[in-house]
Image (cartoon, grey):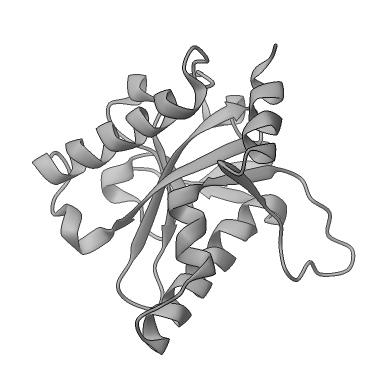
Amino acid sequence: MSIRDEVNGLCEQGRLFRLRPIFLDPGLRERREIYVSEEVNARFSGPWDDPSVEIRCGRAQADLEAFVSRDPIVVARDPRRAGASYMSRLIPPRDEVWDIRSYDPTPGIRVLGRFAEKDVFIALTWEVRRLLNDFDSPEWRTAIRRCATAWINLFHVYEPLRGDYFADYISDAIFDREP
């Protein structure tokens, strides 16, 4: 059995959900795949306590859907100085935890996940950026561990994709800027 078989099985069980763009511009194609955990999917399906939360969750969903067709994906060279990057691999790199950033409207959201294969991202946990405090804070370390634990709970024996350079993970990606 492969990790792809495991992803498909988790989708059939309702433990993972493939996220596809609601609106895909003509001429664009699905270049990559993104799957979301039950936790992340619940943010997109409601119910919401107030309309502003619904709008925020909808915008975050659109930001995640962009992973499928955006060309290029802008990756932060240094997650501590990420500018307007779409995503980055968090520190320490050996944990293989990445985040996708949703900036607007406030509050900023970070969706943490791991790559199952090149161009196949599994979005596992949802974090409000301001609650994470500074990088290297206990809150950030807890968020990274929570993501890694969510991976283990779903995939058990399968390791996330490992690489040295962003091209090992994502086709059509570029660095945001020099650190």
The residue lying furthest to the bottom in this view is: 51
Location of residue 6 in the rendering, given as x and y in whole percent from the top left corner: 64, 24
Q: Looking at the picture, does residue 24 appear above or below residue 50? A: above
Q: Residue at x 67, y 56 (%)?
A: 70
Q: Nearer the viewer, residue 150 or 94?
A: 150
Q: Nearer the viewer, residue 131 or 85?
A: 131
Picture quadrant of residue 62: bottom right
Q: Looking at the picture, does residue 83 appear above or below residue 62? A: above
Q: Residue at x 55, y 41 (%)?
A: 15
Q: Nearer the viewer, residue 67 or 58?
A: 58
Q: Residue at x 89, y 63 (%)?
A: 27
The residue lying furthest to the left in this view is: 138
Q: Nearer the viewer, residue 119 or 142?
A: 142
The residue lying furthest to the front in this view is: 13
Location of residue 82 in the rendering, given as x and y in whole percent from the top left corner: 35, 51
Quadrant holding the C terminus: top left
Q: Residue at x 49, y 16 (%)?
A: 159
Picture quadrant of residue 13: top right
Picture quadrant of residue 133: bottom left
Q: Please give left or right for residue 70 compared with residue 146 in the image.
A: right
Q: Please give left or right for residue 18 compared with residue 150 in the image.
A: right
Quadrant holding the N terminus: top right
Q: Looking at the picture, does residue 156 appear above or below residue 64? A: above
Task: Tell me if I can see residue 123 in this picture.
Answer: yes
Location of residue 109 in the rendering, given as x and y in whole percent from the top left corner: 36, 62
Location of residue 36 in the rendering, given as x and y in whole percent from the top left corner: 55, 47
Q: Please give left or right for residue 82 compared with residue 131 in the image.
A: right
